[in-house]
Image: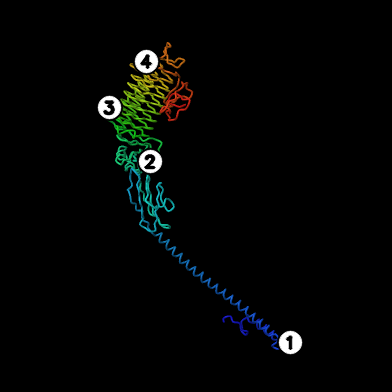
Amino acid sequence: MKNEVSLFAPARRSFPILVAFLLVALTAAACGRSGSDRPEGGVAAVSAAAGSETQAAEAEAAALAAAEAAKAEAAEAEAAALEASGLERAEAERLAAVAVPAPVVSGPAEGVYAAAVTVSATVPLPEARLVYTLDGSAPSARNGTPYTKPLEIAKSATLRLAAYVPGGNASRILSMEYTIGEVCAAPGGKGDGRRGAPLGSVSEAVAKARSLGIGLVKLAAGASFTESVSLDAPITLSGGWAKGFAARAAGYAVVTGLGSDSSSKKAPAYAIRVSGEAADAGVRIERVDFRGGAGAYSTGILVDDGATPAFSDCKASGGDGSYGYGAAVFGGAEPRFDSCTLSGGAGATSYGLSVDSAKARVAASFLLAGSGSVGGYGLSATDAVVRVAGSVLVGSPANVSYGAAFYTCADSGLEGCTVVGGSGKDSAGVFISASDPSIVNCIIGSYGSAKSYGILDNYGSSAPSRLESVAFTGCSGGIYYDADSKRAYIAVDGSGVPVTADGKAMQKPRASRIAVADIPLSPGDAYATPPDAPLPPATPLSGDAAKDVRGEPRTEPWTVGAYEL
């Protein structure tokens, strides 16, 4: 055996055993003992010592063998690790060198659509993954949503797609813009109506919307569209949009109408015309400033032939001609104006709103005569039904100027309004001719230099059907003048009824809660009512009259005039 013990071996570890054996033999001989006295004990001791030494040697040999095996195993593991590391480096180098192709999209091309579209995408590289965004940000391995199934795009967005290899390169970004349920237009635009590629014409945008069955056209704020727009079917024109058409800008969309050499009262030059019974309440127009083009008769808004559109938060003005209209309404039309400002502009005779053989409702709006020098009317209604609530109606410095004028009108009325005649030669806050408008909760002022009346009741059967809770200011010729009787009512008695200079109380119309007060009204503060103005008690009303010119709800106790105090 490899570790067998020999008494005569030169190895160092055998020497103590030999010495012990000789000492035992010499001791036995010196004592005169025969070899049979205690031979078993001596041999046994020697054998035990030899066995112990053998076990120690074997254990040491096993430990050495285990160490050698562990060393070999570690060497093998190190070699394997080096090999794996090399493979990883090689794989990383391979991935870094892979050119990732761009995604391939199937489905509708980018463009304008009436309803949601579904888009699918693939990438012709097994290792590649797809990621997308809809918020305009750049997709990458760290940004975006993993593509797992076809995408339904239900609202306007730009789809941006990219492919990437984990740990490797990314493809170029593919962008596809889809505009859903709207057509966009901006002055100077040369696109197809998408948010990022708007059309350059309102009329073109309307035509495209109708062809696709889309009911919304968005108009950018800023520079003017120069064209005359016609609508004869339900559609919404929404103006005042910022670039990108996702949020409102501070201003309005502007449309300046084309001029006309052959304009007339019933066919004025216009910025927008809404015409025909098909142009019903589904026509909604908001946040647009319409400016009439050049012509003898010019209007910002023309509504005729039975149309019934709704205008909200719009502006409109007539052009520079003989007659200018903020809005002109004819032929059985019945528009509604909410929170609008209508001005006659610079025409010699100008009208904020003119309604002829038609109907109109106005709420929380400004009807301004403009700057005409011959005639100026905040409102002029002829053979019409016009109801105005919570609004400001103002004349001009023209020779003849009225805040509101009614000619052969029935069932019309002014509720919660501030009505101011002009400052020219002949002025009246309200002019009535063969009409019976209801006048409730109003402030009426007039500042004419020759004739100046609060209400001028012209010849014929004319008188308000209701005259209640009205405060008069200015009106140097009288708060109420009856042309038939030539009576001027210049004050009120203790019960709030108008009286003549000799104290005769008004019998027709029946009036109540009338007051005469010095209330300064000026364009500088938009004809606002001073907080300390002495006003008569107001009558609570409902509907449009329950809000003031700022659109704020009126509260108890109510106040008269266009403003909630």
Q: Along the polypeptide, which appears first: circle 4 or circle 3?
A: 3
Q: Along the polypeptide, which appears first: circle 3 or circle 1?
A: 1
Mark carried by residue 482: 4
- At label 1, the amino acid type is Cys
Q: Along the polypeptide, which appears first: circle 2 or circle 3?
A: 2
The local secondary structure at tag 4 comes to strand
Image depth: mark 2 or mark 4 in front: 4
Image: 55 above or below 179: below
- The residue beneath circle 1 is 31
- For the residues labelled 4 and 3, the Cα–Cα distance comes to 34 Å
Measured as percent of width and height from the top left, residue 481 is found at 38, 16
- At label 4, the amino acid type is Asp
Residue at (58% x, 80% y) in the render: 3
In the rendered structure, are the residues bearing label 2 and label 3 in contact, judged by CB atoms less than 8 Å apart? Answer: no
- At label 2, the amino acid type is Phe
Residue 436 visible in the displayed image: yes
**Quadrant hosting residue 389:** top left
Measured as percent of width and height from the top left, residue 418 is found at 41, 24
- For the residues labelled 2 and 4, the Cα–Cα distance comes to 55 Å
- At label 3, the amino acid type is Ser
